[in-house]
Amino acid sequence: MTTTGEKYLTPKMLAQLERMELVSRKIFRGRMKGERRSKRKGQSVEFADFRNYVPGDDLRFIDWNLYARLDKLFLKLFMEEEDLHFYCLFDCSASMEFGDPTKFFYAKQLAAALGYIGLCRSDRVKVESLDPSGRHPGPVLRGRHSLWQLYDYLDSVPCDSNATLAESVKSFCLRNPGKGILVLISDLMDKTGYETALRYLVSQNLDIYLIHVLSQEEIDPEVKGDLRLVDCEDSDVAEITVSKRLLDRYRQTLATFIRRAREFCNRRDIVYMMTSTERPVDQLVANYLRQRGLVR
Amino acid sequence: MNILSAFTWWQWLILGVIPAAIVALYFLKLRRQPVAVPSTYLWTKAIEDLHVNSFWQKLRNSLLLWLQLFLICLLLLSGLRPGCRGEQLEGDRFIFLIDASASMSAMDMEEGKSRLDLAKEHCIGLIDRMKPKDVAMIISFSDRAYPHQSYTSNKSLLKRKIKDIKQTQFKTDLREALIAASGLANPGRTSNREDNRDIQVADALEAKLFIVSDGGVAEVQDFSLAGLTPEYHPIGAYDAPDNVGIIAFSVSQSIEEDKSYEAYARFENFGNEDKEISFSLYANGELHDSKSTVMIKANQTRGAQFDLSAALDKFDLPIELRLEIETDDALAMDNEAFCIINRPKQAKVLVVSDGNRYLELAVTDRLRKLATIEFEIPSYLDSEEYRVQALSGEFDLIIYDRLTPKEHPQANTFYIDALPPGDQWKKSESFSQVTVIDYSRSHRVTQFVELSRIVIVEACSLTGPTATKSLVDAKEGSLMAIAPRQGFQDLVLGFPIVVTQDDGTDELNTDWPNHPSFPLIFKSIIQYLGGVADMDIADNTRTGSPVKIKLEEQFDTIEVKNPVGKKSTLRRAPNNTFLFADTAEIGVYEVKPGKVDETREKFAVNLMNRRESDIRVREKLEIGFQEITGAKVNRIVRKEYWKWFVIVALIVLFFEWVIYNRRILV
């Protein structure tokens, strides 16, 4: 019987994820001591350097052995270990409820996987759905024992938001001013555009990763005949008569959409990655995200 | 094409609503199936420039709609019953008699197409109009009939056989073709109606006889068509085509000089307008004489004469003469004629006589140039040498003066006051004081002699076998007659020249030896029966006629090469002659004896047939006193095309079904 947790991550995946860690391209100051080496010298056990003693320094860090040999006071400097702020935002708009598996489930699975990597490394992990109403604020988690809390949270988030991406991201940025790594998982199917939302994130000086999730039926639609397409979010209608020409045109439009998103991200130092729901999450994390430098 | 509506006006009104209904239904059908999608964002962008919502765009993209409209249009068109006047042949059995004679090579209708080509096309057209179960047979004819195909309903086979018919250079003889058609069409009837065993074994089946010809045929009298219903389809232009042909071309020795030869030609204009022609005479391929701008009046003839002295000086015999009309006209076949001057050939003549001074005088002197003449006494007939010579055909002519051999020799004979062996020849009691009252001026033996004034003391009238022809007649009967005998000819004179008296002296029985006609007739006899003239100036043989070839020496086989290079080997007949029948090509034929690679003789074959050169199309034919006018009696039927529209509609329906199921192309 599959437990709640195994729905998202299997034990095998967990074992695989435990060996990984999140990598930030930027160095951030954490609020609590973590398992992450900092640029700053601090109080870990790993020796870094010596410096001359100046009055006021903590006497506990004076190297007495050196004082005995040289008769000078030197202070031992150690590498500081810090925690990392890891944010994972996943889209919970109605459009995510398509595909097999649904994009929404895929996003939650991916959030769980990345969150678990962070938890294992004692990072400060915050997984949250994109909902400006604040109905489902994501919990701040630390330590692998918090995995169950993460699962509970993911289970509790419904896929029914009608808010725009920009609103949701803005709301998140206002509530979470801290710096860190942010992974945004979305299908970017927002008629108002995704650009504003990404600009908000960029202004936060976060290390941003955008994972663009599309279902197979969006990549290669299998439709035929005369259809009335109804948008599941705003009930907008598009009447089409499927033809080879139209399908070709659709594929061209999708390719252009992806290309523009990638270009937009590249210009703003956002790592963009498009994935299909048919690509297994463990494969995505282990291969693709590793290549992109999010995990190692 | 015309239209015959299958519906009344109000039915058409209802039917007219159908296309509008289809278009309306199409739009009703466009109440599309709703499908929820994550976002219409990409779709909206994709269809922005396709404008599928525009009315015409919708129509443009709907192949199914167009197919449906096309389908209903086809069905409506088939309801209009479009059709045209078509013809079907009446009857169920047909015989096509296609004229392939020389005149059918005339090109007077379409550029590059002969009358035979048009006749073939016409017949193929008729075959196309045959009903599926009708049967037909194909016979082509010229001076002989060739059945190409017996009764069959296989139209493609009939057409193929018609296409295979080849142009001939023969004259036209419809009788042959009619006999062949009648024999093939009427079971149990043969071509030999005199045969008592010709029993009708089955009922005659009526058939329609299509005679496809230009009508240049002789009247066929005394022929019953029986179950054949003739229909004459004239081919060619009715207005007199422009044609000038050579109707005669011959060479003869000049009357004034012995060694001189002259060529005579005669041209005839068969058109209705005067025509200026130019012609040339070639000797052994080299231009010998030429005349230009010779005017020949419409429907008139004109002669031409050529002196051949220069050619005779220049070339060795045989000389090949070719006369050519260089002015183009509708029939090319009669614009060329050939003639040959062969090496003079000496005949071999044996005279068996118990002493006849007048005869000896007549056949010596000048005639020695024409023939080698041997004189023998009557006892020679009993010798073995004579037997061998007579039976082997060594002599061309044997003259028996007042005596009869025991058996017929293998040679032409001339009996003077004697009858050939056997009982076929008879003579009457002798009568005295005989005068000649008539003689044949057309036969080559008597054509140049004057016999009316001779006086005969005593003579007998002659009666010969069935084909005997009297040459000289007295009041009492025939005095000189000629009859054929197995390829030879027997000439019999019913009175002696001299009569031997009891005292052994010869006394004249006639004053004929005192007349110039006496040596002349012997010359004619030696030329004609000795076969001298036959090969000296080779007689003009017409295409299709057999040629008798006789060489001076004896050969078992000879080879004849026709103008197109086809070689035939002939075997010797008992009389040392060779009979060649394959004279299908106009031109010069070469004769080579046995294995000797040397042309010994040549002979020419020409068309020279006024009926073939006269290429005016006859409007009617006469067969067995029945006039057949070229008339069309085909049943006119309406050819309907509505079935084709329905078939196309079904094909469209099939495509619509395929496209509907694929949908991707919608």
Image: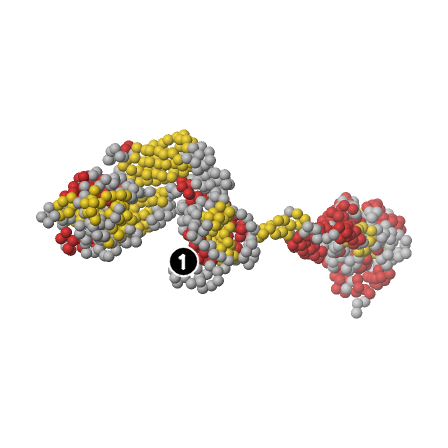
Residue at the far top in the pictured view: B293
Going 10% across and 46% down the picture, which residue do you hit?
B505
Answer left or right for B431 relative to A286. left
Going 20% across and 39% down the picture, which residue do you hit?
B515
Going 74% across and 52% down the picture, which residue do you hit?
B8
In which quadrant is the N terminus of chain A drawn? bottom right
Closer to the camera, B334 or A174? B334
SS category of the residue bearing label 1: loop
Question: Is residue A34 in sight in this rendering?
Answer: no
Instruction: State the colouring used for the structure image.
Output: secondary structure
Residue B411, given in percent of the width and then of the height, sits at 23, 51
Closer to the camera, B359 or B154? B359
> Considering only vertical position in the picture, is B543 above or below B194?
above
Residue B210, given in percent of the width and then of the height, sits at 50, 51
Q: Amino acid at mark 1?
A: Arg
Chain ID for label 1?
A: B
